[in-house]
Each structure stands twice: as structure tokens, then as C-alpha cells.
């Protein structure tokens, strides 16, 4: 699914403020529509906003969206959505897409967000976030939201662009992009990037001082995107290694060597054509693979966890507009994972090899009941080789109540299929559970959107309930090993207010506040669930030098081992040049401007040593890019 056509301009920054706020979205219903017509409170983060704030990873981009918060265990970045982000999970309760293609892997069903994300941020055109249950059109993982990363076209930024970055703790990055318009309307984008960071020396509670070498990181990425007529091809590859300073899983304290290595690859080929005046047919084939290597040092010896998967599949969907007042989309997708390998090389060693498949059939109708009233209704049926069937509806009533105000009432259910890791992984402390069933969520939401002069105000009230929540329990056979089980439930209620506002013709602002309350089955506050989130961001859109600033507040969060991670304020400041010289751009950013000392909750894998880990203090980045 490609991005819809935008205005005929070379840079998003050339658009007037009013038009910047009216960019269409494609993720909520799988076809282009105005945000006011989408059956959800969709947030769009543009390429211009990403560049202005100097966001370096997808995690930092998402952290600018209302109701979302990011945590980090010094290995991976994790997303909390509407107060739900249990430490130690694998980002499995939201679906991550690249141009509409699912990139959650086929072992952990994990969505990678930090430097482990497949793409360099330089190829991102915009990011769309659709909160709420999305299984009616997307299937598994679309439980709390859908993230769609839409990439640039090569013709939008033609030429060869070379960028170099330098930052704190030995950070450096090089990227090269090639964009080109081809004959007969074709388009080509190629990208390569390489990142290195020597890491920082840290003093971790429960562990003590660790050398910088235990926090190092490297990431290399390649991306290609080609389109010619009705055909489109894209492929991405990434390899990332991260040294781990915090002694997870009982590894040796303060000893180098514990690290993770991730590798991912995907390729897709899509064909789109109008089979009639009112019917468009899209067919997409895809192939993906991923691997993980975890090196763990125990008593000076390295034990190793190795997982790998390969998968392929096909999706066919048709959009029909031939019925009066209806826009109907139907689709069928199939994925086969013939190779899912989970191994542990240690004392003792374990080896598991499995395979799986899934198929989904869905339909959605956008029915214009009257001039002011629209019903968006969707239904999807999924069948999995591992557990059986799941059926999930979504209903949204959209009322243009006044000239500038739209009200939406949405209901939906969603599911998350147990991952191959949760079902089959085994080692000395973990037992498999082939009988594991999917977890389910039911959600309700009331949304109000009001257009202001040069702005937009959005408010949401929501409620959701998890059943059969997959959590770690005790294996009933051995009574000693951990095992994933359908043993939990949870409920969340909350409200969100967001404002996008232009100030004159020079400044754009984004402000939000979220109040959320998430409780587990016992009525206790969910771990890593802040009750209050506040975000403010301002950026200049005119002038040669364009400053941008953002301020975040995250309230206290409960820890797995007891106690709380303290509330914190975080401020960032960025200055970016615009057309400083032909083809030249300079950007500099200071992150955690006031050197706030704060920690993020981490999962039970870190044991009794610590339940939270310190995050980065004040740091900087300078970037120079030249296009020729």
C-alpha cells in the first residue's frame, strides 16, 4: 500500500500551515481518507516535523504522539500505548507496518523501534498512528494501535544525498540516499546508513560502575524502493548489535560480552490496477526473515540463544466504489512460516524447530448514511494453524455534528496470537506451552475533533479490557520453570486531549495531555503505566534557521520488583538550517537539555539487581547533509 499523492511540491515545508494539517491518512481503513472521516483519532507525524525536532529513531518519533510513552532497558526500546506497556514484553500489542507491509517478526512478533528498526529515519515521509482495536482489517497484533511508516518517493528528493552525524559517547553515523525520477513516471529510492556508538560509562543501581564498552552499539541498514507503472518493489535489510550493561538473566555483573545481535530482511512486490471504472485490485507478495543472537556470560563462559525465522505470503484486496454511498474493501491474506528455529547453546542445550501458517479474510464498508452521518463497519476472520479461529468486528459512527466539529463513536475487538517464542521456547528456566491461546481485547472510544482557525483540537474518552492476557507463570509440570500462560486480565480507561496549532505563518505547535488508569486483575495499577503524560512541541517553519523545542512530562510508574520510577520532565532543543546553501543542510540538537536524571522500568529478566535502569543524561548531535 503506497502513500497517497500529496500536493505538487518538492518539500513538505513548502506547504502552507493549513494544508500541513489536512494531509490524508491511509492506515485507518486501508484507503486514503481525510482524518475527520477515519474511524479513529489518527495522528500524523510529517517528515518536516521529524527533521525539525531531530528525532533519531522511530521510538523518538512515536514519543511525540499523545498517549504514547517510550521506555528502554539499554537493549531495546518499548512502547506503552494508553498506559499499557508491561515491562519485559516484546512490543507485540501493536502492529508495525512499512508502507502497509507487516514488519513484526515471526518468532517474537516483536515490533522494533529504536536503532533496531529496519529503516533509517531519513527515508521516512510520515508516520501514521491509529489507536484502538484494528484487528478487523489487520488481524493479530493490532490490539492497541497500528503504526504505519510511509517512506519517501525518490522523485520528491532527487539526487544523491550524503549525511554525516556526530554525537555524544562516540556516536557517529553516515548515510547515503539516492532519489531519482525514472522514465514513464517511474521512481527509485536507494538508501544506506551505518551507525556506531562506543557507549557510555554508567553507574547502575545494584550493579555499580560499568565501562563504556558494555553499552556500545552498531547498526547497518539498506533500503530500496522502485515503482514503475502498476508495479512496485521494496526491500530492506538491517543488522544491529547492542552490548548490554545491566546483567540481564543473571549474567555476570560488570563483565563485558553480554550482547544482542538482530538481523532482519524483507522484500515485497505489489501490483495495482483498475479492473473497472469503480474497482481497484491490489496484489502483493512478500518474503521476510529475521534472526536473533543473544550472548550471555555466566561464570566467564558464553552461553548463546539463537532464534531464526523465514516467512512468505500473499495478499489480495479490492476496493469497490460502484455502490451508491458505499466504499467497500475486501481482502484475503496468507502467510506461511516454514522455518521457526529456537535454540539455546548452554548447559543444558535445547533445540526446537517448528512451522506455522495463518490466513485471514476481511471486509470493510464505509457507508454514507446521510450527508452528515457515516457508518464504518469492518469484520475479519482469521485462522491459525497453532490455535484455530478468531473473528473480530469494528463499528464506528462518524457524525459531522457542526461545520467544524466531528464526533465519532467506535467499538471493536482485537486479538494477539501467541508467538512462536511464547509457545515453543525452552531452556533450563523456561518451559514451552503448545496449548497457549490468543489474548483478546474489547475497546470503546468516543472522539471529538474540532477544526480551529489554523489548527485542530482533538479529544478522546476510551475504555478497553484484556482477557486471556498472556503472562509468565509457573510450569505446572515441573513447578520450577517459567511458562507463558493465559493467566491475566487488565482494564484501562482514560482521556486524551491534543492540539495542533499554527501561530501566524511562522510557527507550528503540537500539545497533548493524557490521563490514563490501567489496572490488572487484582485491581493494582499496571506496571510501567504513567497516569499522566504531557507533551508540548514548537517548531519554526520559516527562515534560514529554524529552531524547534519539545517538553515531555511522564508521571511516576510502578516497578516489577516493587517501588516506583520517579516522574520526570524532559526537554529537547534543535536548530536546523533550511536552504543554507544550494543542497546544504545543517542540524544540531541537545537532548535532555537540563540533564534530568530518570530511570525506566524493566522486566523481570533483570532479577533482583534492579527494577529500573538509568537513561541518557544531556547529550548532543550534529548533522551535516549535502545533496548534489
Image (tube, grey):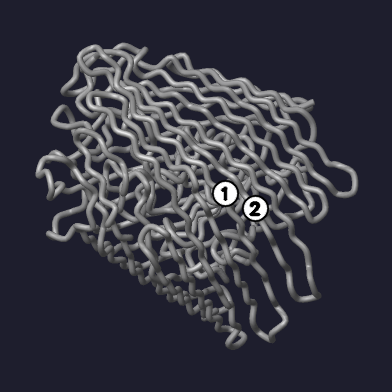
Residue sitting at x 48%, y 66%: 40
Which quadrant of the figure contains the C terminus? top right
Q: Are marks 2 and 1 in contact (CB under 8 Å)?
A: yes
Q: Nearer the viewer, residue 164 or 484?
A: 484
Determine the secondary structure under disc 2: strand
- The answer to whether 149 appears left or right of 233 in the picture is left
Q: Is residue 20 left or right of residue 8?
A: left
Residue 410 picture location, percent across and down: 43, 74
- Residue drawn 64% across the image and 54% down it: 20
- Residue 436 pos. (x, y %): 28, 56
- Number of on-image labels: 2
- Residue at mark 2: 285
Residue 598 as seen in the image, left or right of residue 368: left
Mark 1 lies on residue: 312
Query: In which quarter of the view is residue 421 placed?
Result: top left
Disc 2 from disc 1: Cα separation: 8 Å
**Could you tell me residue 376's position as x and y percent?**
53, 77
Which quadrant holds the N terminus? bottom right
Residues 211 and 354: in front is: 354
Vertical placement of residue 438 versus 136, above or below: above
Q: Residue at x 76, y 76 (%)?
A: 278
Q: Which mark is residue 325?
A: none
Q: Residues within 10 Å of mark 2 (few under 14, many from 20)?
A: some
Residue 236 visible in the picture: yes
Element class at badge 1 = strand
Please tell me which residue lies in front, 84 or 394. Answer: 394
Amino acid at each position: 500500500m503506497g502513500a497517497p499523492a500529496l500536493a505538487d511540491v518538492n518539500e513538505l515545508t513548502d506547504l502552507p500551515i493549513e494544508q500541513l494539517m489536512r494531509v490524508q491518512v491511509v492506515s485507518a481503513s486501508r484507503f486514503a481518507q481525510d482524518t475527520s472521516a477515519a474511524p479513529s483519532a489518527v495522528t500524523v507525524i510529517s517528515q518536516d516535523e521529524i527533521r525539525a525536532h531531530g528525532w533519531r529513531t522511530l521510538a523518538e518519533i512515536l514519543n511525540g504522539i499523545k498517549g504514547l510513552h517510550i521506555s528502554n532497558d539499554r537493549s531495546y526500546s518499548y512502547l506503552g500505548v494508553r498506559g499499557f506497556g508491561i515491562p519485559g514484553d516484546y512490543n507485540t500489542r501493536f502492529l508495525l507496518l512499512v508502507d502497509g507491509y507487516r514488519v513484526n517478526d515471526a518468532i517474537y512478533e516483536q515490533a522494533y523501534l529504536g536503532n533496531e528498526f529496519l529503516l533509517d529515519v531519513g527515508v521516512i515521509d510520515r508516520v501514521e498512528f491509529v489507536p484502538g482495536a484494528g484487528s478487523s482489517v489487520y488481524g493479530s497484533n493490532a490490539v492497541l494501535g497500528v503504526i504505519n511508516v510511509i517512506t519517501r518517493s525518490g522523485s520528491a528528493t532527487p539526487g544523491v544525498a550524503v549525511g554525516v552525524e556526530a554525537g555524544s559517547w562516540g556516536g557517529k553515523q553516515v548515510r547515503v540516499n539516492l532519489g531519482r525520477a525514472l522514465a514513464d513516471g517511474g521512481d527509485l529510492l536507494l538508501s544506506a546508513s551505518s551507525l556506531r556508538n562506543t557507549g557510555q560509562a554508567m553507574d547502575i543501581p545494584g550493579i555499580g560502575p560499568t565501562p563504556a564498552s558494555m553499552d556500545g552499539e552498531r547498526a547497518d541498514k539498506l533500503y530500496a524502493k522502485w515503482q514503475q507503472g502498476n508495479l512496485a518493489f521494496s526491500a530492506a535489510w538491517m543488522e544491529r548489535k547492542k552490548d548490554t550493561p545491566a546483567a540481564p538473566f543473571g549474567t555476570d555483573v560488570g563483565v563485558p560480552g553480554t550482547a544482542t545481535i538482530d538481523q532482519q530482511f524483507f522484500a515485497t512486490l505489489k501490483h495495482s490496477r483498475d479492473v473497472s471504472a469503480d474497482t481497484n485490485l491490489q496484489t502483493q507478495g512478500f518474503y521476510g526473515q529475521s534472526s536473533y543472537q543473544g550472548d550471555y556470560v555466566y561464570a566467564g563462559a558464553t552461553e548463546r540463544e539463537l532464534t531464526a525465522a523465514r516467512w512468505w505470503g500473499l495478499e489480495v484486496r479490492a476496493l469497490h466504489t460502484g455502490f451508491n454511498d458505499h466504499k467497500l474493501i475486501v481482502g484475503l491474506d496468507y502467510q506461511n512460516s516454514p522455518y521457526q528455529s529456537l535454540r539455546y547453546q548452554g548447559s543444558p542445550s535445547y533445540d526446537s524447530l517448528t512451522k506455522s501458517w495463518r490466513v485471514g479474510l476481511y471486509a470493510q464498508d464505509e457507508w454514507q448514511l446521510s450527508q452528515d452521518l457515516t457508518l464504518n463497519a469492518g469484520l475479519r476472520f482469521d485462522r491459525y494453524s497453532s490455535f484455530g479461529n478468531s473473528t473480530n468486528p469494528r463499528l464506528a459512527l462518524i457524525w459531522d455534528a457542526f461545520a467544524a466539529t466531528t464526533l465519532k463513536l467506535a467499538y471493536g475487538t482485537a486479538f494477539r496470537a501467541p508467538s512462536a517464542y511464547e509457545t515453543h521456547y525452552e531452556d533450563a528456566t523456561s518451559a514451552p506451552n503448545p496449548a497457549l491461546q490468543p489474548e483478546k481485547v474489547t475497546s470503546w472510544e468516543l472522539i471529538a475533533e474540532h477544526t480551529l482557525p489554523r489548527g485542530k483540537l482533538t479529544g478522546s474518552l476510551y475504555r478497553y479490557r484484556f482477557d486471556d492476557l498472556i503472562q509468565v507463570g509457573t510450569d505446572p509440570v515441573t513447578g520450577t520453570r517459567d511458562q507463558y500462560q493465559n493467566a491475566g486480565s487488565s482494564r484501562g480507561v482514560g482521556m486524551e486531549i491534543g492540539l495542533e496549532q499554527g501561530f501566524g505563518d511562522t510557527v507550528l505547535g503540537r500539545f497533548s495531555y493524557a490521563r490514563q488508569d490501567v489496572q490488572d486483575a487484582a485491581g493494582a495499577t499496571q506496571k510501567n503505566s504513567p497516569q499522566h503524560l504531557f507533551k508540548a512541541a514548537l517548531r519554526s517553519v520559516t527562515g534560514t534557521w529554524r529552531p524547534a523545542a519539545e517538553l515531555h512530562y511522564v508521571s511516576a510508574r510502578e516497578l516489577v520488583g516493587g517501588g516506583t520510577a520517579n516522574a520526570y520532565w524532559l526537554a529537547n532543543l534543535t536548530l536546523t538550517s533550511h536552504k543554507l546553501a544550494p543542497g546544504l543542510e545543517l542540524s544540531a540538537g541537545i537532548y535532555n537539555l537540563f540533564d534530568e536524571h530518570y530511570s525506566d522500568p524493566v522486566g523481570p529478566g533483570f532479577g533482583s539487581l534492579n527494577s529500573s535502569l538509568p537513561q541518557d543524561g544531556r547529550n548532543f548531535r550534529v548533522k551535516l547533509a549535502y545533496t548534489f
